[in-house]
Image (cartoon, rainbow, N blue to C red):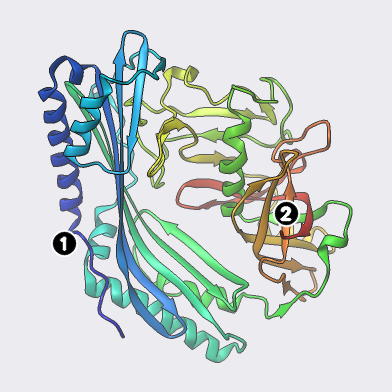
Amino acid sequence: MSMGASAPFERAAQIESELKDNARAALDVLERFGVLGAASLVSVQKEYEWGYHFKQRTVSPLPLKTRESSTVRTYRGDQMFEQTRTSASLKTLAHALETSACLSDGRAEAVPVMPDSNSVRRVVSFDPRLANYACNEAAFKELASALCANTWHEASRVSGLDTFDGHMCYRIRQAMVVRKGGVLTHVSGGLRCRIQFNGRSGEEVLQVNAPQSFLPTALIGARTWRNSPLGVSDQDWSSYRERLPVVFHPRVLEKILRFQGQDVLHPVGSPLKVGAVVADPTVNLIDDPGLDGLFTSRGFDDLGQRSHRLALVLKGKLVRHLSRVNVGGGHHWKRPGGPVQLGFSSLLMNRGDVGFHRLLAERPWQILINQIGPLSRTLNGELQAPIEWGVKIDGQGRNVALPSGQFAITGRLFGTNAGPGILNQARLSHELHDTGSAILPYLFSKVRLILAP
């Protein structure tokens, strides 16, 4: 067994105190620049990630990953000038402010009014108890080792496990928005576990809150292997011309929503008009950064605006676009290493009227898609993604896995004149699943399968 993973903090309190110290230092930089600093806004994100890697029976520490970026916006008249850097050091912020006076490629944008920090809702996306556990090298190592050992113990009872790999990591995201006279800070933290069996099935879990017991976490591998299909389908799914019945796992649904949803729902260039039927009448889609317990929730966005619950689709109809003008803003987010832009925070979809197991048993067979690879766009605007973990379920107990990466889903999230989309044919499970960044149901629909590129 290797040495333990090295956490950058000894306890949770240091995570929050470091962020507050950095915010005060950034405010000092703005104040040193006088009028120029008073007309500027600084948005910073820093991430830390540490943990363990699983490879067969070996548990090894992962190297500490750090990532940071900063965006400085300077307002002159009715123009805004923006610079994004892959550093958040005080020297970088000062250099961005120095050069902002020379920029000439601004765009028309009004100065946002940043609320007082006392008026911003405190959203819970960081549990000090879980952070303290991850900062404790001995405890974290013991949990990772227990997961690996329990998995192989189960494999001694249920044969067929040839390869086992994955990781268990704890990730911290510190966010701050600083303007002269105002500072907003927020910490998110989550424990992510991703495991894979024989290269074709597995599980992925993200938890923000500390559980009453870590026993369920230690048994993730054993439980998942017990329920994994042993056989592999030799069927050519790409030979079907019609759309095939599938059930999307909530984490797959979330990936699709984040990939195509925010682009299609953006008011600029969107083919969808407010009032249009874009989904089955049972579907409601909401962006809610105020949901407690999710890594992506926060009481303010990266322009320092109060974040708001935003209903996008109600009873299958588009009720508004994802736009800054909606409810006073609050939907501009800084992606790690990228600029501040419109996007989703924490997604919420309503529950349906049918249980998950009944949803799987309603048809002679269907494909349960548990994980997909990177999403891409085809030339005609459809989404496409290889199926990494897929299972054909036939209702007779003869479940078989799809070969990982051999087939891909293709289609649209919303329907067009060319045909229905994933959400137009949706049927939702009664169970809701917490992915760590969304609350979503399992979703039945029909899509085409092709050979993966």
- Above or below: residue 95 compared with residue 436: above
Is residue 355 or residue 28 the one in the foreground? Answer: 28
Residue 280 lies, in percent from the top left, at 74, 36
Question: Contact (CB < 8 A) between labels 1 and 2?
Answer: no
Question: Which residue in the structure is indicated by mark 1?
Answer: 10
Residue 52 lies, in percent from the top left, at 35, 72
- Above or below: residue 24 compared with residue 438: above
Q: Residue at x 17, y 38 (%)?
A: 91
Q: Is residue 117 visible?
A: no
Question: Which residue in the structure is indicated by mark 2?
Answer: 409
User: Closer to the N terminus: mark 1 or mark 2?
Assistant: 1
- Above or below: residue 348 compared with residue 264: below
Q: Residues within 10 Å of mark 2 (few under 14, many from 20)?
A: many
Question: Which structural element holds mark 2?
Answer: strand
Residue 232: which quarter of the image? bottom right
Q: Residue at x 57, y 47 (%)?
A: 254
Mark 1 residue type: Glu
Q: Is residue 92 left or right of residue 214?
A: left
Residue 168 lies, in percent from the top left, at 39, 68
Q: CA distance from mark 1 to mark 2?
A: 44 Å
- Above or below: residue 236 compared with residue 417: below
Q: Residue at x 24, y 41 (%)?
A: 88
Is residue 45 or residue 104 the one in the foreground? Answer: 104
Is residue 82 or residue 161 the one in the foreground? Answer: 82
Residue 426: which quarter of the image? top right
Q: Nearer the viewer, mark 1 or mark 2?
A: 2
Mark 2 residue type: Ile
